[in-house]
Amino acid sequence: MEKTFTYERLPKNVEELKALSDLHDEYEVASLVVLVLAAYEHDVEEMIKMYDYINGPTDVSKYQRQFIDDRLKGKEYVARSYFNGTSPQNNYTPDIPYSVTVRDNPYSYDQQGYVTLFITSSGADSDRKVQLRKKGDQYYLWECHLWPDIRIPVKDDSWA
């Protein structure tokens, strides 16, 4: 199955993020991960608070915080690459309204209590995964694999 979620604007804080979802739809939660990562570019501290929220009952550790900084600082385009309409040629500038497409595969629900979903990065050759864990009737981020390097934006590529 594949679902596309459209957002008029990006959340700026946890309250705005909470207003977007009750965390009951796993596909929607996966799309929220992209919104949260995209917030890094505008306000790192609020992004960490939002990441902490979708991370569920487990707080973001100092190690996770450092990992996030290592992956996104100076490479904010990585998060934008998961929005529909982006490409290295347009410097990963998303269409507005923002949209994110999330899909499953035949193995997405193999592990009880967990779901693995996939999101396409316009700068990568294969989909990247997000694993969610179910607690009660809500889904929370368990593992995020949206961090790897991708093709750099054309504006930064001296060989383009």
Image (tube, rainbow, N blue to C red):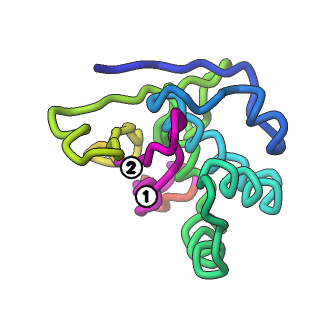
Q: Which region shows up in magenta?
A: 129-155
Identified by mark 1, the residue type is: Glu
Direction from residue 40 to residue 92 in the image, left or right: left
Write the residue at 80% across / 44% down. Answer: 14
Q: Nearest the camera: 106 or 9?
A: 106
Q: Is residue 133 above or below residue 9?
A: below
Direction from residue 108 to residue 135 in the image, left or right: right
Write the residue at 35% across / 46% down. Answer: 114
- The location of residue 156, given as percent across then percent down, is 56, 58
Dot 2: what SS? strand
Write the residue at 40% across / 57% down. Answer: 145
Write the residue at 60% across / 18% down. Answer: 6
Bin the neighbour count of mark 1 within 10 Å (Cα to Cα): few under 14, some 14-19, many 20 and up.
Answer: few
Instruction: For residue 100, say whether it is visible.
Output: yes
- The location of residue 32, given as percent across then percent down, is 59, 37
- The count of marks equals 2
Which residue lies under the disc numbered 2? 131
Dot 1: what SS? strand
Alpha carbon separation for disc pair 1 and 2: 5 Å
Bin the neighbour count of mark 2 within 10 Å (Cα to Cα): few under 14, some 14-19, many 20 and up.
Answer: some
Is 54 part of what is drawn in magenta? no
Q: Are marks 1 and 2 in contact (CB under 8 Å)?
A: yes
Which residue lies under the disc numbered 1? 143
